[in-house]
Image: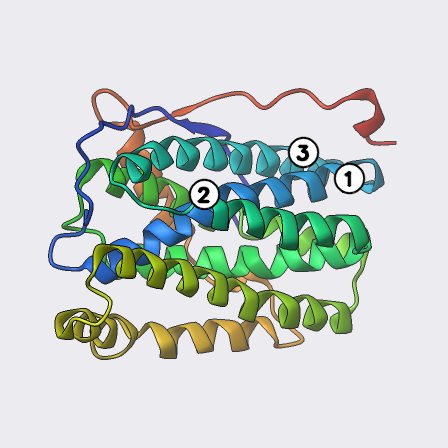
Amino acid sequence: MNETITPRRFASKLSSDIPKHWLPGNEVVSSILNAYTILVPANEGFYVRTLKACMPRIANEQLHARCRNFIHQEAQHGVAHTRYWDNLDAQGYRFRTFEKNVDKLVFRVMEKFGPISLRVSLVSCVEHINSYIGHEFLSQGILAQADPEVKDLMEWHFAEEIEHRRVAFDLLQAVAPNYALRVLGFALTAGLFYSLMCAQAISLLAQDGILWRKETWRQVKSHMGSKHQMVRRTLKHLFDYLQPGFHPSQTGDDALAEEVLARLASTTPPAVAPTQPSQPRASEQVA
């Protein structure tokens, strides 16, 4: 089982002329992933703060190192997606108030009032969601015709979500190996994640003036049902997480992620480049 997690940065400089609907002929998927990108930085910030709070509690040296590399990867995701926001601003989209309210009213409230074990459970569930979203988009080749710059950004992110998909779950088992807590984290996370992403995607489509267009709803039907089957596939992935014997290693996507990351690193110039995580503070050293 591959346990290697390599810290990387998205090295490509995003140009200012990325098209508004960067997946040709599919404004719906473009808007869904634009909504995803709007939610990424606040999500990633919550993951990073949660795992940093856990670091002094991790006695296993290997898990400690994996968590540090996970933190570094997630921080880089937030940086890269925030850079992409400049394009959304230039295209006239209004989203920053929504994003700030989500961060303030969801993540900061949970961080203030939620016990650390519950916060780890939330991260574990949403990381499962991120990894199976990555699995579906990469394995189905959904972004094959996308604008090359956005394709690289999304596929790098999805591949790294697959690469580190075990970490948050393993951390949950180390700090709170309680099935009921895993289910509670699922109950709080799954519906909220999809509600927020769908609400923002609908807002983007409405801002484009195409929400009620027949072609838009044909694309919704294709993505959710007949072609990509995302509703059925999503329900299966969510059901898998609720199985008592579930572990993220059961999804054998390592080769898929490795192929994507190797391809992005071999471009000229490289789309992604390895970097070094910061060294742990003395308070984070393993006892």
Q: Report the front residue among 27 and 272.
A: 27
Q: Identify whether 48 is placed above or below 216.
A: above
- Examine the image and state in which quarter residue 82 appears: top left
Q: Residue at x 37, y 76 (%)?
A: 231
Image coords of residue 1 (percent x, y)? 53, 51
Image coords of residue 222 (percent x, y)? 21, 74
Q: Earlier in the sequence, mark 1 or mark 2?
A: 1
Q: Could you tell me how far apart the alpha carbons at marks 3 and 1 are, in whole angstroms? A: 15 Å
**Colouring convention used in this rendered image of the protein:** rainbow
Residue that mark 1 sits on: 53
Residue that mark 3 sits on: 65
Q: Could you tell me how far apart the alpha carbons at marks 1 and 2 are, in whole angstroms? A: 27 Å
How would you rate the neighbour count of disc 1 (Cα within 10 Å): few for under 14, some for 14-19, many for 20 or more? few
Image coords of residue 10 (percent x, y)? 38, 29
Residue that mark 2 sits on: 96
35 sits left or right of 229 in the view: right
Q: Earlier in the sequence, mark 3 or mark 1?
A: 1
Q: Could you tell me how far apart the alpha carbons at marks 3 and 2 are, in whole angstroms? A: 34 Å
How would you rate the neighbour count of disc 2 (Cα within 10 Å): few for under 14, some for 14-19, many for 20 or more? few
148 sits left or right of 59 in the view: left
Q: Mark 1 and 2 residues: CB-CB less than 8 Å, in contact?
A: no
Q: Residue at x 17, y 41 (%)?
A: 19
- Examine the image and state in which quarter residue 106 appears: bottom right
Image coords of residue 148 (percent x, y)? 19, 38
Q: Please, what is the three-letter code of the amino acid marked with disc 2?
A: Arg
* Kind of element beneath mark 3: helix
- Examine the image and state in which quarter residue 71 appears: top right
Q: Please, what is the three-letter code of the amino acid marked with disc 1?
A: Ala
Q: Report the front residue among 198 and 59.
A: 198
How would you rate the neighbour count of disc 3 (Cα within 10 Å): few for under 14, some for 14-19, many for 20 or more? some
Q: Mark 3 and 2 residues: CB-CB less than 8 Å, in contact?
A: no
Q: Nearer the viewer, mark 1 or mark 2?
A: 2
